[in-house]
Amino acid sequence: MRSTTSTQRKPKSANTAAKSAAAALAAALALSLTACGGNDDKSSDTGATGGKETGTTVTLPKLNGQSLEVAAVWSGEEQANFKKVLAEFEKRTGAKVTFVPAQDPIVNFLGSKVAGGQPPDVAMLPQPGAIKQAVDKKWAKPLGTEAKAELAKNYAQGWQDIGKVGGTQYGVYYKAANKSLIWYNAKVFENAGATEPKTWDELLTTAQTVYDSGVTPFSVGGAEGWTLTDWFENVYLSQAGPEKYDQLAKHEIKWTDPSVKDALTTLAQVWGKKDYVAGGAKGALQTDFPASVTQTFTGGEQPKAAMVYEGDFAQVNIQTAKAKVGTDAKVFPFPKVGDTAPVVSGGDAAVILKDSKGAQALATFLASPDAATIQAKLGGYLSPNKSVDISSYPNPVQQKIAKALIGSGDDFRFDMSDQAPQAFGGTPGKGEWKALQDFLSNPKNIAGTQAKLEADAAAAYGN
Amino acid sequence: MTSATEAGVPPAPASPKSRKSVTGTRRTVAAMFLLPALVLLGALVVYPIGYSIVRSFYNQSGDGFAGIDNYKALFTDDGIRTALKNNIIWVVFAPTIATALGLIFAVLTERIRWGTAFKLVVFMPMAISMLAAGIIFRLVYDQDPDKGFANAVWVGVHDTFAQSSAFPKAHPGRNSPLVAQSGGFITKTTVHTGGTITLPLVGVAPDQMPSDAKKAVEPQADPGRITGTTWQDFTRGKGVGTLGGVDPTELGYPGMKIEAVKDGKVVETAKAGADGTFSFSEKADGAQLRLPASNFKEAYNGLDWLGPSLVTPAIIGSYIWMWAGFAMVLIAAGLAGIPRELLEAARVDGASEWQVFRRVTVPLLAPVLAVVTVTLMINVLKIFDLVFIIAPGSSRDDANVLALELYQKGFAEDQPGIASAISVFLLLLVIPVMWFNIRRLRREVRR
């Protein structure tokens, strides 16, 4: 008897295993979603009223009775805020807009939708590579004249260009991320008598000052490779300049290039000092991104680290650590290593998948400052739209971040690893992620890291 | 339909009737009965296997024949080779250890009064999903001894035997008179009788300062002795303040050990007081002062459970935690079926308990043990979730297993050809184990 009951249990548990794999995936997705999502509870109330006061700068057609679907990977607060923008669109046009929650990677999600003959009208694609993929697979439809006119009016040329494929405009970058920020624990800086650095050398001095006060200067979330690639990109963009950056992103120059060596040498000035990184290299490699932020802003006057590098979306994690952005947690732009301070960005572009008057109108609306202002007021959001008034952002920190992004004009660069093939720039434990993780644990091995990066890149780019 | 009517009819007349119809239309009826099962089996098992095999010979996009390129990649790609190696480690260790533990638990619980309660506890992890178990063990293996249970125990044991020092992160500040030497620090200049010396350091966190630390005082010259101060040259909110000089709120380093070194030999040692002051006799005249490494020993941080070298054993540990209970329950059932007389007979013949276990119990249980091991082997070959969840990104490729690599290649890297090749390879690995299981089952039936 007992033996039969227990043998019956066996297939059951195998079943659970399969289920939990799916759940694990979902959990991982949820994590990555929250990592990208921004939420600012306090400002959402003000925003709800603020949304209605927004002026009208764009004329939209009447679309009574039409219905549209918009797919994006956003969840939680971010999704709720975006829905308020869609509500405004519904109010102005009379169309009905449904938000379709998608999963990462959204291109795979859309693939199944397209294969099923039910693509959403508009999708938010996170990388230039994804837009190109959508165009190559003939899913994406070009923008119409109204949308293009709105785009030309409100966007810097650089932001328009990354929405183009083969000279045709497909994407409207609705949401941006500023990944050139260093967040710091204000209390620690005050205790140590440290100041916000403007250059890399000043950053090292600041780090030393903080270290002398008894706090480890940096927190690095090395368990996730993308934080490391972002570090590298900022140093590289500032040191080697935008042209080289573009070439490296397209793998036109090799990773064995001397400029890469310089960037890695510079990085090693921080990563290579045993006591500069919280937990040492080994500890950093076990610290995931949310933990790297929370450990910087918890622990009173003795946090595990004083500074943490990452984009504006780190605010979400700062708030989970019960620290206040602007008072407990402050921010300074990534210091310049070369001639100019780097601005590395990310973003989500609206792409039309089903051409219709409604879809075009929605793209036009998303390119207008009206839409962006609504969400800007709600917080946790950054728009590349230069016509959005900086004062729309709810707090000084947000305003500072937005100013740095818009102020860079065309000199910003899109996240390099996001432009690379996924096998190289976006897979845990592989390619650039893994190479930089190995570099973090052994910062003396610059030549070996370059060789490994080049080998992996060559395989992934296929050249 | 026929079976439904049969069920209603009394058994006696029904059996000859059905026998007749079966002999008459045997093949068609058989086919009809088999059809639903065949269709389902074909659509859900045979077709996917067949298509995977076909797909494994095509390239990434699926429109060009690739020959055996995908299989070549299987044995040349570093990631897949690590996965293969790890799978072998898994298959060898996880089922055997789980079975061995299960056997021990089963035999022991037979003997104790609260056996059932004990079995319940050991079996409990089976009720937890792999996902939850993974998350639990991610925490258990956390590097930080304050969070990770494994390291908390390890560090606790370690610190009982070796204590860390009070000033782990102290280091010389700018323009310091000290230079680093084999983990400690030594003065650049020599000291002389009647002179004073300052040994400023920085970097001890305020909350880690010994509680008896007092405000540091400048060394007072003493004609017959060498005097000095060692203190934290750092003022809150002001940085170092006077560089190399004692500021009013700066604290001394009580208990800091100082050695006077002449020609590489220690001639005298001293300990700093609560205000950081210390002194040497004239014996130390002309010596360099050294703060030995023992002052700065780092707090022990435990093992790197999820680092590259330990991650696979660590995950296997969590697997065993889950599945030892399963093995135990199956083996206990087998144990209940062993004729008591044999054990009694052995005992009467004067066999010790160990001999009874070794020579009687285990051989009699062999078939059950084989079933358990083989079942676990099949289970282990497809291990995915625990590795996926427990291994942090930085050691994911060191913990890689075939099923995870299959998922990565197929869904993250968009390489369905290689992913199919991996799945075919996995199938080939499972076949001998399945064949063994089926053969054993047949033998059992015949017996």
Image (tube, helix red, strand yellow):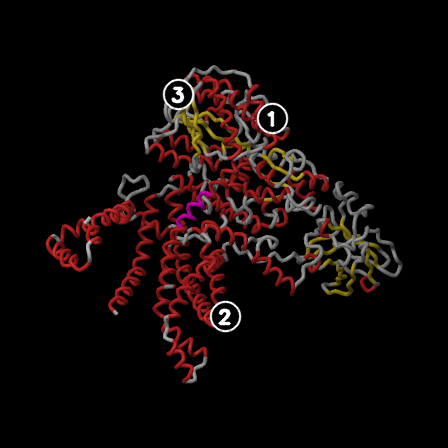
Residue annotated with mark 1: A46
Q: Is residue B363 left or right of residue A402?
A: left
Image quarter of residue B193? bottom right
Q: Residue at x 83, y 46 (%)?
A: B248
Q: What is the three-letter code of the residue carrying label 3?
A: Gln
Q: What is the three-letter code of the residue carrying label 2?
A: Arg
Position of residue B280 measured from the top left corner of the image (x, y, whole percent) = 82, 61
Q: How many marks are shown on the rendered structure?
A: 3
Q: Is residue B76 visible?
A: yes
Above or below residue B78? Residue B12 is below
Q: Residue at x 45, y 49 (%)?
A: B388
Image quarter of residue A295? top right
* Mark 3 / mark 1, whichever is N-terminal: 1
Q: Which mark is residue A66?
A: 3
Provide the major secondary structure of the magenta segment. helix
| Chain letter belonging to callout 3 | A
Report the magenta residues as a range: A17-26
Q: Nearer the viewer, residue A442 or B125?
A: B125
| Chain letter belonging to callout 2 | B
Single out the residue that lies furthest toward the bottom: B349
Question: SS of the residue at dot 3?
Answer: loop
Q: Nearer the viewer, residue B118 or A403?
A: B118
Position of residue B314 measured from the top left corner of the image (x, y, whole percent) = 49, 58
Q: Nearer the viewer, residue B157 or B234?
A: B157
Q: Which mark is residue B113?
A: 2
Above or below residue A387? Residue A209 is below
Q: Is residue A297 left or right of residue A387?
A: right
Magenta stretch holds residue B16: no
Q: What is the three-letter code of the residue carrying label 1?
A: Thr
